[in-house]
Amino acid sequence: MLRALSTLGARPLGRPPAQFLLLARGRKTRHDPPAKSKIGRVATPPAVDPAELFVLTERYRQYRQTVRALRKEFVTEVRRKVHEARAGVLAERKALQDAAEHRELMAWNKAENQRLHELRMARLRQEAREQERRQAEEAAREAGEAEAWAQLKKREVLQLQEDAKDFITRENLEARVEEALDSPKSYNWRRDRHTRGHSGLCLWASQIASSFLYVGTFVHLRYIPPGPQTQGRGHFQQ
Amino acid sequence: MVQLTIVLYKAYHQFSHLTIRLALGGCTKWPFYHIVASLNKCPKDGHFMEQLGSYHPVSNSYGKKLIALNLDQIWHCTGCGAHLSKPVEKFLGLSGYFPQHLTVVTNAERFSKTDTEATETRELTSVNIAVGIRLKSS
């Protein structure tokens, strides 16, 4: 231990040595001189009775022999207990019980895992079936929607075809224009504080109602298509 | 705080041993001792491994000084290599499980040389120690 701790006293060069002793008041160190009152003092050991010393020596020998024997007994007792705890009958029984308990626990764990696995598989199968059903429903819905869309477009196409029969073409342009001009329907419209820019038909009622506030001029314009007299330009005329 | 490395720790504790001794407690004018098993390097009233008994040096109302000893654990600690201090050896000698300590016998004999027989009996019985022993029931 001293060799191991001797490195603690090693200090670099130039530094004062480490202080291991602390000076306490009233205590003399080995370097202090003795007091004047102790000059003629001669240290004498206490007187020893040789008979008592002999008796005591023998008694101490017997005492220590007894105590040593007792200590040996205690040591053997401790070692026996340690050996029994490690490799005794009780320890073996306990080890067997522990092993049996461990086997039981492992078997129970295995059974639990199997049960949970089966539950999990059933749940997964159920979820897969649900997923398939949802997908089938989704596909059917999408198919229905596509069919409806197709039908709508078909109807629109047919409607357009029907409407196309009534379109204005170059052949019937003149006739349609004359027909529009001769019809009583007015396409003029106006906006004021009481209206919202409705078309001519809706405006009749509001026009009558607001005639008391505002008197406007209602102009029927006549459309002149382009022709040789109009110099190739169409225009409106009152 | 300094913590020793493993090497220094082992080097330091290689030469320390378990000791069963008295640890002082209580207050002024009322001492009280615990009989403890601790390493000899530890402070005598400080950290200990195990308490093995107690000793009241002050007489109680019946004039007795009580000593308690956990003999099973004392034997176990001694079997593990614990040393015993002189007061603990004296207590064990008084309890009867150890031989009587020689200082007790020697002091008694010395007193008997100077004083009369009455003084000797008074010295041996003046202690008035009541020893409580705890043994495992097995």
Image (cartoon, coloured by chain):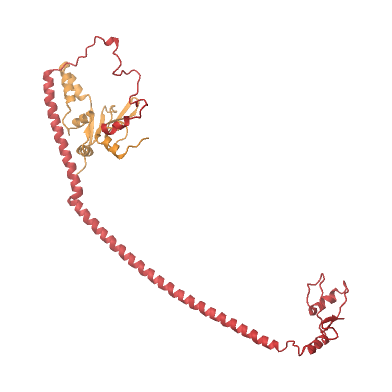
Chain colours: A red, B orange
Q: Residue at x 13, y 21 (%)?
A: A53
In the shown orientation, is residue B79 left or right of residue A172? left
Comparing B136 with B128, the one in front is: B136
Q: Position of residue B47 (x, y in %)?
A: 31, 35
Q: In the rendered image of this protein, does residue A196 appear above or below residue B114?
A: below
A138 in relation to B31, above or below: below
> Residue A169, relative to residue B100: is it above or below?
below
In the foreground, B6 or A95: B6
> Could you tell whether A210 is left or right of B77 in the image?
right
Please tell me which residue lies in front, A181 or A47.
A181
- Looking at the picture, how far across and down is residue A162, in whole percent? 68, 88
Residue B14 sits in quarter? top left
Q: Is residue B36 visible?
A: no
At 26% across and 60% down in the image, what residue appears?
A: A103
Compared across the picture, whether B7 is left or right of A221 comes to left
For this rendering, which residue is in front, A115 or A41?
A: A41
